[in-house]
Image: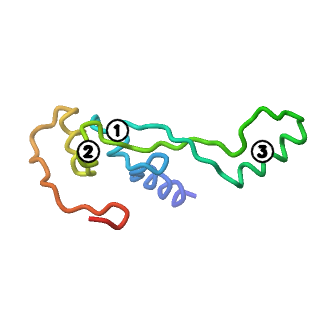
Amino acid sequence: MWDYRLIKAHYLLEDWYRDGIPIWWDESDRVTFDAKARTSKSRAAIERAQESDSKKKAKQHGKYYTAEPRVMDGGEMPTREEWLDEQERKKGNNSGPIRTREPSFVQGKK
């Protein structure tokens, strides 16, 4: 029982993603998000079946929204290291050295 709770706590503390978006993008002051509409064929099938039961035909089938990040200044997306440095600065901890940027890979690209 305790092992499960410890593992779950560790997982929650180390969770670096929110809704599939890296937390350093999600909480960065340099990044904003646009909502983009997507269509899901599987959701559409379920919604059509539900609709036929309720006899409402005014709904768009399968439409849902996802968040797509974009950098406000047009530069590169912030790295996790940059976000961690930003968090330290916000806390008033300027004692540690700022991390140097290392090559990062996003979705298999340099």
Please state the horizontal and vertical placement of residue 81, each as a whole percent of the image: 23, 51
Q: Amino acid at mark 1?
A: Glu
Q: Which residue does the image show at 90% across and 40% down from the upper left? A: 53
Residue labelled with disc 1? 27
Which residue is disc 3 drawn over? 47
Q: Could you say where residue 57 lies in the image, as x and y percent from the top left?
A: 82, 35
Q: Is residue 37 left or right of residue 108?
A: right
Nearer to the camera, 22 or 46: 46
Q: Nearer the viewer, residue 29 or 12?
A: 29
Density class for disc 2 (Cα within 10 Å; few <14, some 14-19, many ≥20) is: some
- What amino acid does circle 3 point to? Glu
Q: How is the image coloured?
A: rainbow
Q: Give the quadrant of residue 89.
A: top left
Disc 2 to disc 1: CB gap under 8 Å:
yes
The residue mark sitting in front, 3 or 1, is 3
Q: Residues within 10 Å of mark 3 (few under 14, many from 20)?
A: some
Would residue 36 be found to the left or right of residue 45 on screen? left
Q: Position of residue 83 (x, y in %)?
A: 26, 44
Placement of the C terminus among the 4 image quadrants = bottom left
Residue at 17% over, 32% down: 92
Which residue corresponds to the image point at 9% horizontal and 41% vertical from the top-left? 95
The earlier-in-sequence mark between 3 and 1 is 1
Q: Secondary structure at mark 1?
A: loop
Residue, x 53% and y 57% (percent of image)?
Answer: 2
On the image, numbered disc 2 is attached to which residue? Answer: 83
> For the residue carrying disc 1, how many other residues have a C-alpha within 10 Å: few (<14), some (14-19), or many (20+)?
some
